Image (cartoon, rainbow, N blue to C red):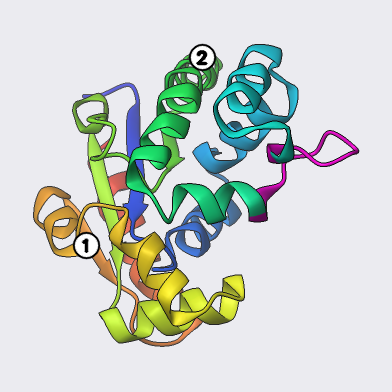
Amino acid sequence: MNKHLIVAITGGFATGKTTAAKFIEDEGYPVIYTDLLAKELMSNDKEVINAIIDSFGRDAYKDDNSINTQYLSSIVFSNLEQLDVLNRIVHPKVIELMENRLYELVKSGNQLVFVESALIFETALEDGFDYIICVSCEPNIQIQRAMQRHNLSEEDALKRINSQIPIQKKEALADFTIKNNGSIDDLKQSTSLVLNIIKASL
């Protein structure tokens, strides 16, 4: 019998993975959000900040030293080589921070711990998880959600979607797929079903 399980929640840009993760968190399970770890590092880690300024210029940060997300996004999602530069600066430290937090959560007795990240397969982290959940939706729904939620043009939404591994490939590699083509309640129900299956395997 496993003493603990570590589960990844992944998907594409604007497919609903964070919403699914929040439902799991609401059930009382710890969730590590790698986007928040990245923001934390980009805001507070001097080494990361200096490397970003060296690579993308002083405009990468605003006058109050907060990240100039709009400026950085316009560069990295228009040029995948630039995205790769940013990822090489941020990802190793995100992974280290994620592993430290996982260790702390497991050590303190949590049997079931979740990590929400769009880039599980892109960063070859899949072998570090007992299960992987992929949250996906139809391409037209994904584009609409990306445009509405992030205030993007269709062109910019597609750039972000296409910067990741195709969702069909993620579905094929995952242990569970949650199709998020309907309402929030549908997503909640599907997430709850998958959560119950994983809990049963503890």
For this orientation, the residue located farthest to the left is 172
Magenta-highlighted residues? 60-70
Left or right of residue 173, residue 52 in this image? right
178 or 194: nearer the eye? 178
Whether tag 1 and tag 2 are in contact, CB under 8 A, the answer is no
Taking 108 as reference, is 185 above or below it? Answer: below
Q: Which residue is mark 1?
A: 167
The type of residue carrying mark 2 is Asn
Q: Give the label, 1 or 2, closer to the camera.
A: 1
Q: Residue at x 73, y 30 (%)?
A: 43
Q: Residue at x 68, y 17 (%)?
A: 45
Answer with mark 1 or mark 2, whichever residue precedes in sequence.
2
Q: Which residue is mark 2?
A: 100
Is residue 186 visible to us here?
Answer: no
The type of residue carrying mark 1 is Ile
Taking 12 as reference, is 119 above or below it? Answer: above
The stretch drawn in magenta includes residue 45 = no
182 or 43: nearer the eye? 43
Q: Position of residue 54 (x, y in %)?
A: 60, 22
Label 2: few (<14), some (14–19) or many (≥20) C-alpha neighbours in 10 Å:
few
Left or right of residue 87, residue 174 in this image? left
Q: Position of residue 7 (x, y in %)?
A: 33, 39
For this orientation, the residue located farthest to the right is 64
Left or right of residue 170, residue 9 in this image? right
